Image (cartoon, rainbow, N blue to C red):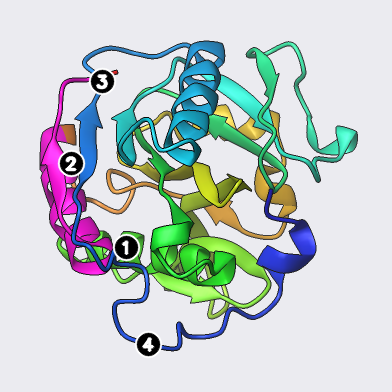
Amino acid sequence: MVSEALISSPLPTCTSAGKLRRLDGRPANWMIAESYVPYPDALEVMRSRAAAIAAGEAEETVWLLEHPPLYTAGTSAKPSDLLAPDRFPVFDAGRGGQYTYHGPGQRVAYVMLDLRARGRDIRCLVEGLENWIIDALAAFNVNGKKREGRVGVWVKRPERGPFAEDKIAAIGVRVSKWVSFHGISINVSPDLSHYSGIVPCGIADQGVTSLEDLGHIVQMAEVDSVMKSAFERHFGTVRVAPAL
């Protein structure tokens, strides 16, 4: 599991180009769910697949999906940050971080990678996930940024003031036996009012946004295509496989 102290500290640049790529070039499976996936089902699949990868019995997997509306609590979640506990189901995620929202219109990517073959560097993994998101957003002319002390990807909102920013993508990972699971979420076109039931990621002085909120009306399939290309630039090749 990635501790809050670890992911909140400044992330060093990975020490060598391509550190997160497998030296053997083996592709990861790239899977896209065709319908909403209940959160408990996703947790069970992730845990099972990560254990199988650690045992050498399954291939690495990137699983793209959407959830029905729900809140998840990371290991550092504060009860006071759950503002509307009866609004949507709340699940203990078992990942690092605090409260977040998942729902329709948000692309979730669960990333089950064998870090034994990818440098054994958790900080580098988090940096790589951030760079993956930033690269994907750039395809839609969105300038995503990292922020020291705030994991995730942010965009400036100068119309609200010189220091105003909104979060467009979240990151929360767990690592067990050097295999990662959980991953990232990018707001494509979710109902942003659903975030009002929590203090997202414990940050109360900034907002949340989406591609749609920024004026970019795109289909989820377009986002998936861009994410696939960007993933391969940062992590190596993938192989399209049937959905889990």
Query: In the structure shown, which secondary structural element does the residue marked by tag 1 occupy?
Result: helix
Q: Nearer the viewer, mark 2 or mark 4?
A: 4
- Relative side of 65 to 193, left or right: left
Q: Label 2 vs label 4: CA separation? A: 27 Å
Mark found first going from the N terminus, 2 or 3: 3
The residue at 43%/37% (across/down) is: 53
Tag 1: Cα neighbours inside 10 Å, few (<14), some, or many (≥20)?
many
Q: Label 3 vs label 4: CA separation? A: 34 Å
The residue at 15%/28% (across/down) is: 241
The residue at 58%/78% (across/down) is: 11
Mark found first going from the N terminus, 1 or 2: 1
* Kind of residue at badge 2: Asp
**Residue where numbered disc 3 is placed:** 33
Q: Nearer the viewer, mark 1 or mark 4?
A: 4
Instruction: Identify whether 14 is placed above or below 100.
Output: below
**Residue where numbered disc 4 is placed:** 16
Residue 75 shown in magenta: no
Query: In the structure shown, which secondary structural element does the residue marked by tag 3 occupy?
Result: loop
Dividing the picture into quarters, in which one does residue 40 lie?
top right
**Residue where numbered disc 1 is placed:** 132
Note whether residue 75 is visible: yes
Tag 4: Cα neighbours inside 10 Å, few (<14), some, or many (≥20)?
few
Q: Label 1 vs label 4: CA separation? A: 16 Å
| Most common secondary structure along the magenta stretch | helix
Residue bounds of the magenta highlight: 221-243
Residue 223 shown in magenta: yes
* Kind of residue at badge 1: Trp
Query: In the structure shown, which secondary structural element does the residue marked by tag 2 occupy?
Result: helix
* Kind of residue at badge 3: Ala
**Residue where numbered disc 2 is placed:** 224
Query: In the structure shown, which secondary structural element does the residue marked by tag 4 occupy?
Result: loop
